[in-house]
Image: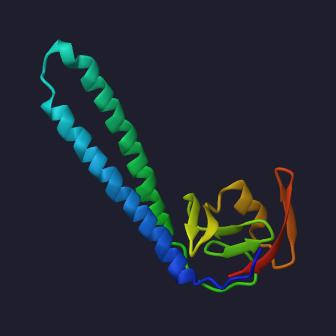
Amino acid sequence: MQKTSYNKTDLRNFVNDSINGKIKTLDFYLNFSLEASREIKKTSKYDSIREEIQEEIYHLDKQMVSLKSMQTQMRKVLNSVSDTIKLGSLVITNKARFYISVSLGEFFFQGDRFYAISPESPMAQIMLGKKVGDDFTLNNIHQEIVEII
């Protein structure tokens, strides 16, 4: 993996902006679904459609709670420097780049692939406290820690 310098503040802002964008999109769909449910005629003929919309609203609400929780968790992610992996660390291994923050999953930043993972995830749990040069194996994939930012 080619060594590149990353600015953690920019990375943190990118993750925050991604979460905020998802919240905005979800809010649009939620409002659209609520409006659609109000416009359906109140006759038994349309009961199944109303039920489907209500179920969709329920799922959108659950997703919104999850995203709001991520937003709150990101407030705890600090850009402090450390020799060991902890919450807020950007970990570069010989296989991938991990940002220990929230469970956002795969994303691309400055043309490179990253994984935003929660500190509770198995990957983060195995990495927490490790230093540059340490290695670990998870799911039969062996990785060496190349850099901690």
Q: Position of residue 58 (x, y in %)?
A: 35, 37
**Furthest residue to the top?**
44
| Residue at the image point whose x is 47% and y is 76% from the top | 13
Residue 23 figure quarter: bottom left
The count of marks equals: 0
Q: Nearer the viewer, residue 115 or 128?
A: 115
Locate the N terminus and report the quarter of the image it occupies.
bottom right
Q: Nearer the viewer, residue 141 or 108?
A: 108
Residue 4's place in the image compared with 130, above or below, is: below
| Residue at the image point whose x is 87% and y is 73% from the top | 134
11 left or right, relative to 113: left
Q: How is the image coloured?
A: rainbow
145 left or right, relative to 50: right
Q: Position of residue 149 (x, y in %)?
A: 68, 82
Q: Position of residue 38 (x, y in %)?
A: 15, 34
Q: Position of residue 8 (x, y in %)?
A: 57, 81
Residue 48's place in the image compared with 68, above or below, is: above
147 left or right, relative to 42: right
Q: Nearer the viewer, residue 6 or 70?
A: 6
Residue 98 figure quarter: bottom right
Residue 54's place in the image compared with 9, above or below, is: above
